Amino acid sequence: MFASLRNIFSSRPVAPPPTVPDGTRYYAVGDIHGRCDLFEALADAIDDDDRRAGPARTTVVLLGDLVDRGPDSAGVIARARRWGDERKVDLLIGNHEEMFLDSFEDTGILRHFLRHGGRQTVLSYGIPQQAYDEATLEELQQLMAARVPQGDRDYLSAGRDYLVVGDYLFVHAGIAPDVALDQQSSHHMRWIREPFLDHADPHEHFVVHGHTITDGIDGRANRMGIDTGAYRSGRLTALVLEGTERRTIQAVETDGTIVIETGAVAA
C-alpha cells in the first residue's frame, strides 16, 4: 500500500520553471539606495553583458528604492534617467520614493523620511549642511523644492507599482498572498514584508522583489528577493532572466575597489 501511495505522489506532474517570452532578456536591479558608484559599475556591466549575450529585446527593471541611506541619491536618479534615454529602463516605485515625493507636501512624512535615510538624499542635492541643520521642516521643504529638479520628481512619480513579464511579476516589496493582482494595493506592493515573505504556496506569478535585505539572493519556490543591502554591504545585485535561465551580475565594493561578479541561479 505504501509503495502504491509513493507511486501516486511521485507521478504528479512537476510544474515547468517560470520563463520570460522568447527573444527577450530582462535585467532586474535591486535596491540601490544612493550607491551611485555601484550603480554606475553595474549599469556598465549590464550593457557589456547585453552586447555579449547576443540579440534580444532587452529591458532593465529598477525595482525601486533608488534613494536614501547611501551618499548620492541625486546621482543615482540622474544616472537612471540618462540610462533610460539610451535603452529601455522600467522604474518601479518603492517605499522610499513614496516617502521622498510625499515629503515635499507633508511635514509629518518629511520627518519620517529624514529618519529613514532621507537626510542623505536631501544633502546629495547640494543643500549645505549648516542650512539643513538650522532649517525648520517648512524651511527644509522650501530648500528641497528649490534644489531638487522637477524632472527628477516627475521621473520618480512616473514609476509603476509592478510589471508582469511572462511567468514573472516584478514588484518592489511583494504582494498580499491570495489576493488577485488587480486587487493589490500600492501600499502592499511598496511596503509589505509579512505575510508575503513566509508565504510558501504558489502565487499567480513568480515574484521578483527587493525591499527586504538578505545577505545573498533569497530564492524560494514562489519568489526571489534580490535586495542585497547595497548601502551597507557594498553589494548591488542584478538578476538576469532569459527563457528559463537565471543568473546574476553583482557590483561589489571592498575597501574602495569595485569588481563585477557573476553567477548562475537555479531555476
Image: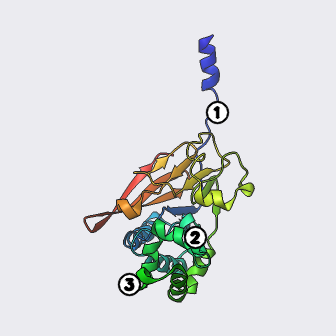
Closer to the eye: label 1 or 3? 3
Left or right position of 44 against 11: left
Spatial separation of the CA atoms under disc 1 and disc 3: 65 Å
Instruction: Name the quadrant containing residue 14.
Output: top right
Q: How crowded is mark 2: few (under 14 residues within 10 Å), some or many (20 or more)?
A: some
Closer to the eye: label 1 or 2? 2
Give the x, y percent position of residue 27.
51, 63
Give the x, y percent position of residue 33.
45, 67
Residue that mark 3 sits on: 130
At numbered mark 3, what does the secondary structure look like: helix, strand or loop? helix
Residue that mark 2 sits on: 109
Q: Is residue 263 above or below residue 41?
A: above
> N-terminal of the two: label 1 or label 2?
1
Spatial separation of the CA atoms under disc 1 and disc 2: 50 Å
Determine the residue located farthest toward the left in the rendered image: 255
Q: How crowded is mark 3: few (under 14 residues within 10 Å), some or many (20 or more)?
A: few
Q: Is residue 52 above or below residue 136?
A: above
| Residue drawn 64% across the image and 33% down it | 13
Q: Is residue 6 above or below residue 137?
A: above
| Residue drawn 60% across the image and 45% down it | 195
Q: How crowded is mark 1: few (under 14 residues within 10 Å), some or many (20 or more)?
A: few
Residue that mark 1 sits on: 13
> N-terminal of the two: label 3 or label 2?
2
Query: Is label 1 in contact with label 3 (beta carbons under 8 Å)?
Result: no
Q: Which of 221 and 234 is in front in this view?
A: 234
Spatial separation of the CA atoms under disc 3 and disc 2: 22 Å
Q: Can residue 21 be seen in this view?
A: no
Q: Nearer the viewer, residue 168 or 224?
A: 224
Mark 2: amino acid: Ile
Mark 3: amino acid: Gln
